[in-house]
Image: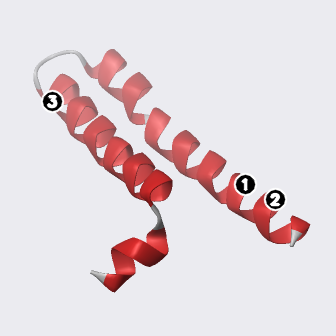
Amino acid sequence: MNYFKKLGTANLLMLTLCALIIFVAEYLFLNGDPEHGIFIGLWAPTLLGVMIYLKLVDNDSK
């Protein structure tokens, strides 16, 4: 439980959103709509990249 406190609410929410995006993309891809599945699947790495960027900017300001 200490790990979740250290992670923070915003980061935990964004990671949960990434997991949800991946499941939706897999669902779309496997149910006959591969273009939309790939398009939505690319949102998760973009969101993770934004998280990393924000964390780097926050660490640089300290």
Q: Is residue 5 above or below residue 61?
A: below
Q: CA distance from mark 2 to mark 1?
A: 6 Å
Question: Residue 61 appears at what percent x and percent y?
Answer: 89, 65
Between 24 and 1, the one lying in front of the other is 1
Residue 57 is drawn in which quadrant? Answer: bottom right
Q: Look at the numbered discs 1 and 3 and tell me whether their residues touch, using CB distance below 8 Å.
A: no
Judging from the image, the colouring scheme is secondary structure
Residue at numbered disc 2: 57
Q: Secondary structure at mark 1?
A: helix
Of the two numbered discs 1 and 3 in the rendering, the one whose residue sits closer to the viewer: 1
Crowdedness of circle 3 by 10 Å Cα count: few (<14), some, many (20+)? Answer: some
For badge 1, the amino acid type reads Tyr
- The residue depicted at 54 percent of the width and 42 percent of the height is 47
Q: Look at the numbered discs 2 and 1 and tell me whether their residues touch, using CB distance below 8 Å.
A: yes
- The residue depicted at 39 percent of the width and 57 percent of the height is 12
Residue at numbered disc 1: 53
For badge 3, the amino acid type reads Tyr
Q: Look at the numbered discs 3 and 2 and tell me whether their residues touch, using CB distance below 8 Å.
A: no
Q: What is the number of the mark on residue 37?
A: none
Q: Is residue 31 above or below residue 1?
A: above
Residue 33 is drawn in which quadrant? Answer: top left
Question: Residue 44 appears at what percent x and percent y?
Answer: 45, 42
Q: Secondary structure at mark 2?
A: helix
Q: CA distance from mark 3 to mark 2?
A: 34 Å
Q: What is the number of the mark on residue 27?
A: 3
Q: CA distance from mark 1 to mark 3?
A: 29 Å
Q: Is residue 23 above or below residue 24?
A: below
